[in-house]
Amino acid sequence: MVEGEKGIITEEFEENSRWSLMKLKRKSTFFVFNILIPMVLLSFLNVLTFVLPVSSGERASYAVTVFLSLAVFLTIVASEIPKNFNTISIVSVYMTAMLALSTATVVTYLLELRLASRDKDTDSIGSGYTAIYRIARICQCRLDGKSRIATEVG
């Protein structure tokens, strides 16, 4: 062991691909290319679920596949991030939020598919759907700055 101006260095010192010993600065290239870029791309794929037509049966499988991809990627990211019990990393919070949004996407699609596949002549829209529609219209009106409340459901 050698002690000097720059700290203590052991004779068994080996270069590390993630850390620079003297500066104690994390090398961010590994995390950018292996965690951040794939995470942003998966998030983008989650939004593209709504581009597929409702009539195709592939939309549900696509939404579930993106959800499972996010879940698997979250476990991979959790194993790569240093463990710290005092704080939660922003990456973990972001991935959990994306997982929650992916769940909401799947549920939204299934509700939309249920409405699209009903027989318009014999099946009426349920009261649950009507309540959700009215709440959405009220929120939309408040965001638009208008005071009208939608009362009709098509």
Image: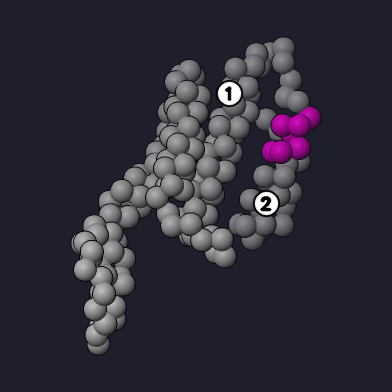
Look at the image and say whether residue 129 sits in the magenta stretch. yes
Q: Which of 24 and 144 lies nearest the eye of the viewer? A: 24
Measured Cα–Cα span from mark 1 to mark 2:
23 Å
Residues packed near mark 2 inside 10 Å, few (<14), some (14 to 19) or many (20 plus): few
Residues packed near mark 1 inside 10 Å, few (<14), some (14 to 19) or many (20 plus): some
Report which quarter residue 111 is drawn in: top right
Answer left or right for 113 relative to 22.
right
Q: Which of 85 and 96 lies nearest the eye of the viewer? A: 85
Answer left or right for 118 relative to 98.
right
The magenta span reads 127-133
Compared to 65, does 91 lie above or below?
Answer: below
The x, y position of residue 105, in whole percent, is 54, 36
* Residue ranking furthest to the front: 1
CB-based contact (under 8 Å), mark 1 and mark 2: no
Answer left or right for 83 relative to 13.
right
Q: Looking at the image, can residue 72 be seen? A: yes
Query: Residue, x 64% and y 16% (percent of image)?
Result: 118
* Residue ranking furthest to the bottom: 5
Identify residue for label 1.
113
Query: Residue, x 74% and y 49% (percent of image)?
Result: 149
Which amino acid, mark 1?
Leu
